[in-house]
Amino acid sequence: MNNRRDILLISHAGHSIGNGHVSRCFALAEAFTSLGTPLPLRWIVNSEAHAILRGKGVQKNSLTVVEKTFWDGADTVLSTVSQLHPDICIVDSYDASQAFLT
């Protein structure tokens, strides 16, 4: 039985929104990793969040950068989610609309 779970975290950071969203997602990623089972963690973030995560040691190949993640870039994000087909998708943003989440 395969218990592997692919996890996708979608968030952003920046001067006007702060770093709390991406920091929470990073804490969740650390918690998943601490479970002892290697979990494929993928990220969709904006460039500011990308810089923060790279600074924390997140591998570049696990990061997809989409500017304006929840606005003009939402179609790109949703297309990427569809391609990755994760088992778990975590979204952390006040800007994620109901339409985005469904």
Image: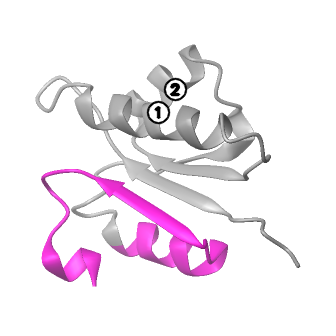
Position of residue 66 measured from the top left corner of the image (x, y, whole percent): 43, 52
Residue carrying label 1: 26
Earlier along the polypeptide chain: callout 2 or callout 1? 1
The type of residue carrying mark 1 is: Phe
Tell me the quarter of the image containing the N terminus: bottom right
Pick the front one: 102 or 51: 102
Q: Which amino acid is tagged 2?
A: Leu
Spatial separation of the CA atoms under disc 2 and disc 1:
8 Å
23 shown above or below 69: above
Helix or strand or loop: what does disc 1 sit on?
helix
Q: Nearer the viewer, residue 60 or 9?
A: 9
Residue at the spot 14% in from the left edge and 32% down from the top edge: 17
- The answer to whether marks 2 and 1 mark residues whose Cβ atoms lie closer than 8 Å is yes
Please, is residue 81 above or below residue 68 in the view? below
Q: Which residues are magenta?
A: 75-102
- The percent coordinates of residue 93 (x first, y second) are 22, 50
Question: Would residue 47 be counted in the magenta stretch?
Answer: no
Q: Looking at this view, is 56 or 75 the one in front?
A: 56
* Residue at the image point whose x is 52% and y is 26% from the top: 53
Image quadrant of residue 71?
bottom left
State the mark number for residue 53: 2
Crowding near pointer 2: few (<14 within 10 Å), some, many (20+)?
A: many
